[in-house]
Image: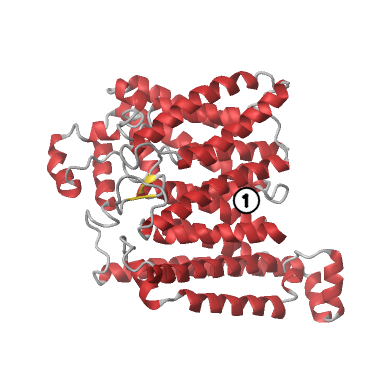
Amino acid sequence: MVKKISNYSMYIYCFVMFIIYPLFFKNGYYDIGIAKYDFFIKFHMVALLIMCPLILWKDKIEFSLLDKTVLVFLGANIISAILSDYRSAAWRGSEDWYMGLFSQIVFVLTYFCIKNVGSLQNKGVHAIVWMALGGATVVFALGILNRFAVYPIDMKVEHTAFISTIGNINWFCGYWSIMASMGIGLYLISTGKMKLLSGSYCFVAMLAGLVQGSSAAFLVVLGWGSILLWQAFNSKKRLQIFIELFAIGSLAMEAVFWLEKAFPKGMKYNNMLIKYFMTHQPGILFFSIACAVWLVVYFACPQYDLLTNQSGDEKKRELCNDSKKFYNISMHRKKVEEILYGIRLGFFALLILGTVFAIYCAMKNGWIVLDDNFGNGRFGIWMISFELIKSMNLRQFLFGVGPDCFDIYLYSFPDLAPRLSEMFGSYRLTNCHCEMLNNYINIGLLGALSYFAVIVISLRNFTQKLKLHSELWVVVFGICGYILLNLVSFAQIMNMPYIFILMALGERINEQ
């Protein structure tokens, strides 16, 4: 009986968080952040009240290294809040943001509940993943339609900075970075009908990413490409997957062109990239190139897997029957693998150097200017943040100014008021637009290092078991998407809870 209650409670929790919560809103876009937070907290008060006692029914509770690091992170938040000059604000956090100590406690408790409550087999993992992607598909579809002034759901106000049932573009992008990345991870391991479904999801996610309005999303796409390209050197199958996802992205570009034709007065958000897709129609060209390259790889590279030691013995014998030369090469496979690894490193080194050189040339020619407005004002925010760090005393340096107290601390400096007013007008700056920097100011060196350790240890744990548990690709991509976006963005109530859920699921998969 207790086992059934544990299982049902976990699946109901995931259903609400992945399907109901993203779609929930109250009174349209008016106070949508407050409405989301109230729903989140009230639901978790009930969910944790049920799930926390169920942990005690587990036969044996062991604390992994990741578990201990998560507890250290929570401890850093508690110490920071106790020592803060803004204790009352540190408990709940900034208004409309609410990422204070209370939210951090809920995130950590959720992590331990999802990790320990109920039994979870492969079918259960798949069910939770499809819950996440099912809810995200609706969210993404609404976001795409909203961008073209189609509102199936009345959100009370039409505004270019708000789309779907998530609200603010930054919040939408935060949610998108995790859910879209999970879809890419799923496509990497899918076969047959599942591959068709995951490919369709990737198309919708990429289209939502193209039209959502935040250029920070392209950091996530760059991360996908880098991981997939690195994997493409491992086997012919992974090389084909890289090409297939490029083709899906090309179709998403093409869809932007045709949607604009269908709704010529609808698109209310136009950046340079979207305008280029609308006027030059590069999607069909990229798709054609991808199809041609895929066919070349399929027909002209039968020995690729032999060289990279990815085929089974039967396949190796089949390949070797036609070519003694490849048989001889296979006898020296270790050397071949070293050569391929060197080529891979060289390729990525050239890619990085080329990017650095391109940025240098752009700065030299005045195309990129590092002033307060660079990166939609992010460079100016980071410079202000470094000034705040310089002003911190030893206690604040070690333990921060308090969880989610960045804005209170910032606006306590009158000499910064004119600069902030010039950059943001009447809007209040509530975070650094860089999660690690934000953590450093809010919860200090201890908090920032412990959070960094949580991310590093989780990725290390999961990547080490990828061959044993392929489902971990979904978790790894989801976490990577979140990290990449938050290099220039921030944790909020529509993305950070999912990271703790993903880490808990990853730990459970590892334990199987």
Which of the 4 image quarters holds residue 200? bottom right
Q: Does dot 1 land on a helix, a strand or a loop?
A: helix
Would you say 461 lies left or right of 41 here?
A: right
Q: Which residue is mark 1?
A: 473
Q: Position of residue 131 (x, y in %)?
A: 59, 44
> Along the horizontal axis of the image, is 418 left or right of 408?
left
Residue 94: where, in percent of width, then height?
A: 31, 32
In the drawing, does residue 403 fall left or right of residue 291? Answer: left
Res. 127 image quadrant: top right
Vertical comparison of 325 with 15: above or below: below
Position of residue 379 measured from the top left corner of the image (x, y, whole percent): 27, 52
**Depth check, front residue: 266 or 249:** 266
Is residue 430 shown above or below 118?
below
Write the residue at 68% across / 46% down.
Answer: 465
Residue drawn at the location 41% of the way across and 44% of the way down: 166
How many discs mark residues in the rendered view?
1
Residue 361 position (above or below residue 76): below
Q: Give the image quarter of residue 308.
A: bottom right
The x and y percentages for residue 327 are 82, 75
Residue appearing at x 38%, y 68% in the figure: 260
Which residue is at 41% across, 50% downward?
Answer: 173
